[in-house]
Image (cartoon, helix red, strand yellow):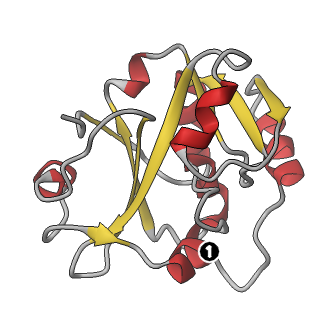
Amino acid sequence: MTDQSPKTPEALFHFLDSLSIKHQTKTHPPVFTVAEAVALRDEIPGGHTKNLFVKDKKDQFFLLTVEEHAVVDLKTVHTIIGAASKVSFGKPEKLMEYLGVAPGSVTALGAINDTGHNVTFVLDADLMREEIINCHPLTNEATTSLASADLIRFLEATGHTPLVLKVTA
């Protein structure tokens, strides 16, 4: 992201519309963890996501988007994603700077704010088998559903070529 303010959910929806990407958003009370989000599963079909914002020792940043209950081995995932070293979690300040979101609202849709292309987006291959993917629309007070192929189209339209890799155990 540059010095401009992060995009709003409304700006995100406008961008999706401009790409002719079908999306549906359901508002709900704020959810900060997968455990809190489980209550929404009956109301929102499709694959639900967990996002890990990580970095290597060279300050290369990655967003790993996986199925909400999937396990990612942070000691070995660097060998799969092409990181220079083992990864650790990125700081909240960098999350806001690059993706325009706070912890609890992390989402692949934050790519709309990464105009400097500082983050590599990694989509887990198992998650991408889902027809519909559910993500936060830059806020944890809603869930946006879109086709998995359209998530890739969105990322590409923001100038990011996502890596689709098996990063879960």
In the rendered image, the vertical position of residue 112 relative to residue 42, given as above or below = below
Q: Can see residue 16? A: yes
Image quadrant containing the C terminus: top left
- Tell me if residue 106 comes above or below residue 71 in the rendering: below
Image quadrant in which the N terminus is located: bottom right
Quadrant location of residue 96? bottom right
Q: Nearer the viewer, residue 4 or 27?
A: 27
119 or 78, nearer to the observer = 78
Residue 156 shows up from this direction: no
Q: x, y percentage for residue 161?
A: 43, 47
Using residue 73 as the reference point, say whether residue 33 is left or right of it: right
At which x and y percent is residue 102?
64, 68
What residue is at 58 percent from the left and 56 percent from the top? 106
Amino acid on which the number 1 mark rests in the picture: Met
- Residue at the spot 81% in from the left edge and 31% down from the top edge: 25
Q: Which residue shows up at 73% across the image and 46% down it?
A: 137
Residue 20 spot, x, y in % from top left: 78, 27
Q: Which residue is mark 1?
A: 96
Identify the image quadrant of residue 43: top right
99 shown above or below 77: below
Look at 64% across and 56% down and name the residue there: 105
Q: Is residue 41 left or right of residue 92?
A: right
